[in-house]
Image (cartoon, coloured by chain):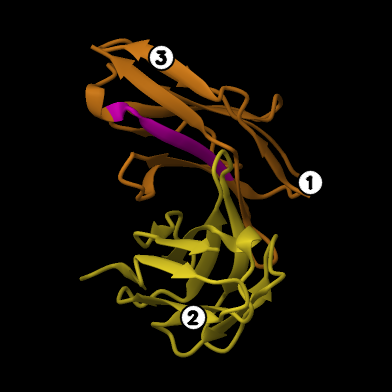
């Protein structure tokens, strides 16, 4: 069974600083995808970034990058130059690429950006 | 494009009552999902539909039924609501081969 672990329930970061949100995963499926979603206090789920298990390079999307270490089964999200609007819950998720492509979410990290 | 829409936004039920949560997407996506989100937890998959006419159980299907009425619509039914089903329910859709799931705004359900 696949599993996602986010060990940081909450984090603080100073505005304009970089922050890393941790995510480790476990799966027996050789082909999978890893995601990060942002959930602001308004409640909507916002897709941030995707990394495929066979991708050679780490994914980047603007200020977001995914530090993918396959051997360690980690997929940490790095946010550079934090902004006040980055304050939100962040969820790591994994999708197996076989079967019905079930998506499993972690429990989330609450990030607060301090002015 | 409205994306993924959900109705209602809020609902309060009494134990034992039934209701259907509606979800529709106008992006011509094949795959649709229902999740629940409880405080302090991530999203857990209730049911999934790979295409019109097919549905599969997810992680927490007990107490729920679904209907994939057509390509656009995927409804979630609670036949006899229980307080343990108090949660925020999200519907999502995805194009085959696509990476991103598009989420609806959620339905906040309280069962008394």
Left or right: residue A41 versus residue A69 is left
Left or right: residue B82 versus residue A77 is right
Same chain under badges 1 and 3? The reply is yes
Q: Is residue B19 magenta?
A: no
Residue at the spot of label 1: A28
Q: Earlier in the sequence, mark 1 or mark 3?
A: 3
Magenta region, residue range: A86-93
Comparing labels 2 and 3, the label whose residue is closer to the camera:
2
Residue at the spot of label 2: B20
Task: Please indicate, yes or no, whether residue A79 appears anywhere in the rendered image.
Answer: no
Corner quadrant of residue A59: top left
Badge 3 element: strand
Question: Chain B in the picture: what colour?
Answer: yellow
Protein chain holding label 2: B
Protein chain holding label 1: A
Q: Does the magenta stretch include residue A90?
A: yes
Along the line of sight, the residue nearer the viewer: A23 or A39: A39
Going 49% across and 61% down the picture, which residue do you hit? B110
Task: Please indicate, yes or no, whether residue B72 appears anywhere in the rendered image.
Answer: yes
Corner quadrant of residue B26: bottom left
Residue at the spot of label 3: A12
Badge 2 element: strand
Badge 1 element: loop
Comparing labels 1 and 3, the label whose residue is closer to the camera:
3
C-alpha span from label 2 to label 1:
36 Å
Q: Are marks 2 and 3 in contact (CB under 8 Å)?
A: no
Q: In the picture, which chain is orange?
A: A
Along the line of sight, the residue nearer the viewer: B40 or A35: B40
Along the line of sight, the residue nearer the viewer: B29 or A53: B29
Residue B25: give x, y in percent of width and height. Answer: 35, 75
């Amino acid at each position: 069974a696949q599993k996602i672990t986010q060990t940081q329930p909450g984090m603080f970061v100073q505005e304009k600083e970089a922050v890393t949100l941790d995510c480790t995963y476990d799966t027996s499926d050789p082909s999978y995808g890893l995601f990060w979603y942002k959930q602001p206090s308004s409640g909507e789920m916002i897709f941030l970034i995707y990394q495929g298990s066979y991708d050679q390079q780490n994914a980047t999307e603007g200020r977001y990058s995914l530090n993918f270490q396959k051997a360690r089964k980690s997929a940490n999200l790095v946010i550079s130059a934090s902004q006040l609007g980055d304050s939100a819950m962040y969820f790591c998720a994994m999708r197996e690429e076989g079967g019905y492509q079930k998506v499993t979410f972690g429990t989330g990290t609450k990030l607060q950006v301090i002015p | 494009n409205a994306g993924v829409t959900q109705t209602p936004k809020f609902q309060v039920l009494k134990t034992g009552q039934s209701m259907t949560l509606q979800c529709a997407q106008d992006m011509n996506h094949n795959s649709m999902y229902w999740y629940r989100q409880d405080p302090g937890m991530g999203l857990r998959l209730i049911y999934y539909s790979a295409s019109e006419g097919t549905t599969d159980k997810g992680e927490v299907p007990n107490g729920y039924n679904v209907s994939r009425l057509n390509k656009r619509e995927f409804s979630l039914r609670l036949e006899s609501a229980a307080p343990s089903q108090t949660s925020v329910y999200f519907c999502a859709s995805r194009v085959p081969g696509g990476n991103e799931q598009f989420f609806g705004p959620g339905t906040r359900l309280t069962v008394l």
